[in-house]
Amino acid sequence: MNGRLVMILMLGGAAFLPYLVSKQSPVHDSLTAPLKWIGEAPAEPSGTKLPGLDPHYGSTGGDSHAFVNGGGAPAAGKVASPQPRTASRGDAPLIPIEQALRWELTPAWVMSTWPRVTTHLAELDLQGYRMSLVTGTTETDIAGSLTYYFDPQQRLSRITFNGTTGDARRLVTFMTQSHRFLRHLAADDPGLYLYQVEQDQRALSELKIRAAPIVKAGNPYGRFEVSLDMRRPEE
């Protein structure tokens, strides 16, 4: 009797087992649900894109204007934010325009301010001191080569500078207000902005500004080339 009952149960189980493990069976879901998370990545929630994946995220448009009379149109399109300007040399201090371009300076101040100074410069009876100048980290600052010339009495007689700027309005304002430079039209060169100090009907000092040959959106500090030659007015 027991043997016959065991045989019946075995035959019934063999017929019912395929249904239990089939996908239509509710038992199948309860047995296999925990296995669904193994080896599967959860779906990405909607609206959760990382902003860093957008190439324009956090970018700024080129909104700097040309220096003359505030003219110039903003640059079109979005460009990557420029890196802040730093000293052109690791040993170049940041000296503001208003401090670097003045006649009260002395050789002792120059030697104590710049860690690196070139002194073997022949200019008639003047002693030259040449340094790298960076006046700050904004587009209105200037960067380049600065030279002071002192006479035998150690009095500053001449200042020259050759470099670049992104916006020359600050420089022009300082030179016109503090050193009496005046704008002159260069009839033979429409791309030149010329400022001069005249004495005895001749140009004693000159400031020349012109657009760089190639203006790059990623280099807003080099839009203009600057050439300055200042000579102390005769007293």
Image: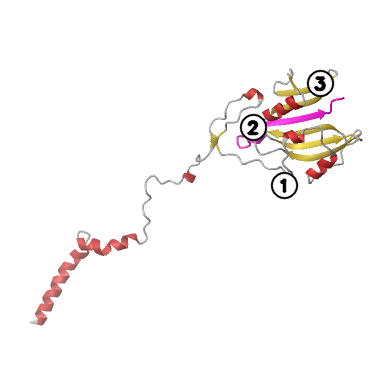
Q: Is residue 203 left or right of residue 192?
A: right
- Which x, y percent locates residue 108? 84, 42
Residue marked by disc 2: 215
Q: Quadrant of the N terminus?
A: bottom left
Q: What span is in magenta?
A: 214-235
Residue marked by disc 1: 90
Residue drawn at x 57%, y 39% is 81
- Which x, y percent locates residue 78? 53, 35
Does the magenta segment cover residue 143? no
Mark 2 or 1 closer to N-term? 1
Q: In the figure, 162 relative to 192: above or below?
A: below
Whole-angstrom CA distance, mark 1 to mark 3, is 38 Å
Q: Is residue 92 left or right of residue 14?
A: right
Near mark 3 (Cα within 10 A), the count class, few <14, some 14-19 or many ≥20, is some
Q: In the figure, 71 relative to 138: above or below?
A: above
Q: Quadrant of the C terminus?
A: top right
- Residue 168 in sight in this render: no
Residue drawn at x 86%, y 18% is 200
Residue marked by disc 3: 198
Near mark 2 (Cα within 10 A), the count class, few <14, some 14-19 or many ≥20, is some
Whole-angstrom CA distance, mark 2 to mark 1, is 25 Å
- Which x, y percent locates residue 128? 85, 37
Displayed quadrant of residue 130: top right
Instruction: Report the number of discs.
Output: 3
Q: In this view of the protein, which residue sits in the foreground, 51 or 182? A: 182
Whole-angstrom CA distance, mark 3 to mark 2, is 32 Å
Mark 1 or 3 closer to N-term? 1
